[in-house]
Amino acid sequence: MNTIDHLILGTIIDTAHDHFFVVAANGTIDYVSPSAAAVYGISCEELRSSNVQRLEAEGVLNPSISMEVMRTGQPAQLIQRTATGRRVIAQAHPVFEDGKLVAVVSRSMDLTDLQLLQQEYAFLQQRFSEHLKRSQEHEQGDLSLESELNELQIKSPLMREIALLLKRVAPTDATVMLLGESGVGKTAFARQLHHWSSRNAGPFVDVNCAAIPDSLFEAEMFGYRPGAFSGAAPGGRVGLIEQAAGGTLFLDEIGELPLAMQTKLLKAIQDGRIARLGENLSRQVDFRLVVATNRNLIQRVEEGTFRLDLYYRLNVIPVTLPPLRERREDIPELVNRQLERLNRRYSQEKLLDRTIWRPLMRHEWPGNVRELENWLERAWLSCNDVIHADVPGLTHPDATGQQEPTQARPSPGAADVSIIGESEGLKDAANRIERSILAELCEALPSTYAIAKRLDISQPSVVRKLKRHRLRVKNS
């Protein structure tokens, strides 16, 4: 590298928002960007005169990501807590020469800055929302939605505002991230976004990331040539990304994607090119990416289970869909639509009892639209000509005005996992109930595959859940 190239590279690193370290294979620090001093509480001269082993022992690097890479020879990502009281996310990559580790390059970002950026974005999003409400264009657009939202069946102002936002961004190729609880209708909105886009003549490829086993993910997403591996189809396979060419690729439950797969997906998004398994040549694929998750991805980034750079790539247009309990105006339309579907599917004309609406409107619907539709189908199948509210799963006000569930309470001695404690939130209660169910199945069933079949989820999902709850199958 000549002098000018060296100066250019040095200027880029010195002025970057991230904080860079270049560490030799023995742990000595060859280079550190000036901005790192404020974060780690020690001057650049002191950092360069030290080594990562000593800095970790003194608590300056807590822990040292460079030492992790030196130990494993693999890229790493982790959260550090610095002596200045800051929390930073660090990423590091090994540098090899003739197969020998010669250096580690790391960069870190202060999560305090990230939180400020999030707050600024939320403020701008609020300002944009207020502008939409005031503008005449918003009023005209809102009226035009009437004939275009038949499948979504939304009436609440909040959801109509979200729909209008999606309609505005639909003609672009910007990546949209749909956020919200399970069952709020993220897939339906993704399909509507595709319908509004200029790619609507192309395919809409719906992929549930949590349903694909880790061992098959690369083959499913990128495809493979004939004979690429044992058991491969004789004619090869076109991957899901390639199937979305000219259309929209919808990746649901993106937060469940393992780290190794996140790296491969990030490269495909950045390059716009993929290579099938067993092929050396890559091919260009033109698709629009839409993702969805019910996870807090920032929290997963902090935990080290989701790549920060992938998060930035995906979080271009974040759209949060509120739970059904916050938009109860939509319940009547959703109920009527589902009733029409059921009557059509089973070739009967059942009706709703007029007393059903109060409990329907008051129920919390923790499972959102999916729970509402499932309960109504269960009620449709359980009742004769008129659907009543006495089908298990629905709460309704008793004589005192309190909410009481219609389903029977557990028998004496049974584990009462359905009651939320006074100081317990929904998330904590759900985690407790999930752990209780998994613990019982670990005792009763012989393998994670059997548990997956019983719960109707994928085996990798079971493995991840057991690991999170620190459980294991009794006979394994």
Image: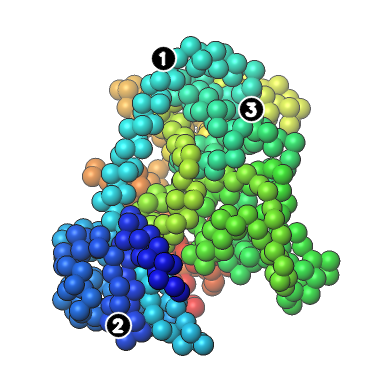
Q: Is residue 152 visible?
A: yes
Q: Which residue is mark 1?
A: 134
In this rendered view, identify the residue nearer to me: 358 or 104.
104
- Please tell me how crowded label 3 is: few (under 14), some (14-19), or many (20+) other residues with Cα within 10 Å: few
Say if 151 sits above or below 185 in the image: above
- Please tell me how crowded label 2 is: few (under 14), some (14-19), or many (20+) other residues with Cα within 10 Å: some
Give the left or right position of residue 83, taking residue 371 as reference. left
Q: Position of residue 136 (x, y in %)?
A: 48, 11
In this rendered view, identify the residue nearer to me: 414 or 83.
83
Q: Amino acid at mark 1?
A: Arg
Residue 27: numbered disc: 2
Say if 390 sits above or below 214 in the image: above
Eye-nearest disc, 1 or 2:
2
At x 46% / y 88%, what residue is drawn?
A: 100
Q: Which residue is mark 3?
A: 151
Eye-nearest disc, 3 or 2:
2
In this rendered view, identify the residue nearer to me: 295 or 97.
97
Quarter of the image for residue 465 reads bottom left
Q: Position of residue 329 (x, y in %)?
A: 47, 20
Q: Sequence order check: which comes first, mark 3 or mark 1? A: 1
- Report helix, strand or loop for mark 1: helix
Q: Position of residue 325 (x, y in %)?
A: 42, 30
Q: Is residue 412 visible?
A: no
Q: Amino acid at mark 2?
A: Gly
Give the left or right position of residue 359, taking residue 114 as reference. right
Q: CA distance from mark 3 to mark 2?
A: 60 Å
